[in-house]
């Protein structure tokens, strides 16, 4: 099985940037589609971004499009989420997820493995 560990969260002012990392265990990282989800207090977990095993099919929720960039380094078993122009509404716990599907949409049930999350807080 795959274990995922997120890092890079923290407190940042509106308009600032953060880079999240998700480190995966195992030697088959390159076979997984990776996704980022987020969950604000009192709200359901929502899709933010995903990237296929090849890195050729990145996709984003409308709420983050143009501000966030997802990437992966299969040699390092790591996926990243570069977050720019952060807004207070981006405040949430961010979760990394993985699936063996070659392509996945923004549904939580599509993902088989989840990290424990990293807190991102954006002040106004």
Image: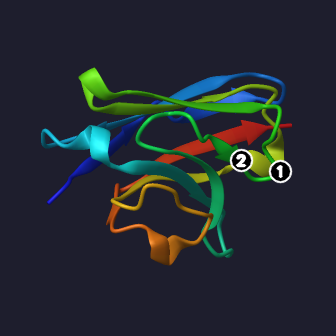
From the image, tell me which residue sits under label 2. 60
Label at residue 99: none
Q: How many marks?
A: 2
Quadrant of the image occupied by residue 30 = top left
Q: Is residue 3 left or right of residue 63?
A: left
Name the mark nearer the viewer: 1 or 2: 2
Q: Dot 1 surroundings within 10 Å: few (below 14), some, or many (20 or more)?
A: few
State how far apart marks 1 and 2 are (Cα).
8 Å
Residue 103 in the image: above or below residue 120? below
Q: Is residue 6 left or right of residue 119?
A: left
Q: Residue at x 13, y 38 (%)?
A: 27
CB under 8 Å between discs 1 and 2: no
Please say which color scheme the image uses: rainbow
Quadrant of the image occupied by residue 81 = top right
Q: Residue at x 70, y 49 (%)?
A: 91
Identify the image quadrant of the C terminus.
top right
Under circle 1, the secondary element is loop
Q: Residue at x 83, y 39 (%)?
A: 87
From the image, tell me which residue sits under label 1. 63
């Amino acid at each position: 099985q795959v274990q995922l560990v997120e890092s890079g969260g923290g407190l940042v002012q509106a308009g600032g940037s953060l880079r999240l990392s998700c480190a995966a265990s195992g030697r088959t990282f390159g076979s997984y589609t990776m996704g980022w989800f987020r969950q604000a207090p009192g709200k359901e977990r929502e899709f933010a971004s995903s990237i296929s095993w090849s890195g050729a099919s990145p996709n984003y929720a409308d709420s983050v499009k143009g501000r966030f960039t997802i990437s992966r380094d299969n040699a390092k078993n790591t996926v990243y989420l570069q977050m720019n122009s952060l807004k207070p509404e981006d405040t949430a716990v961010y979760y990394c997820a993985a699936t063996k599907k070659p392509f996945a949409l923004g549904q939580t049930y599509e993902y088989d493995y989840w990290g424990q999350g990293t807190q991102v807080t954006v002040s106004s």
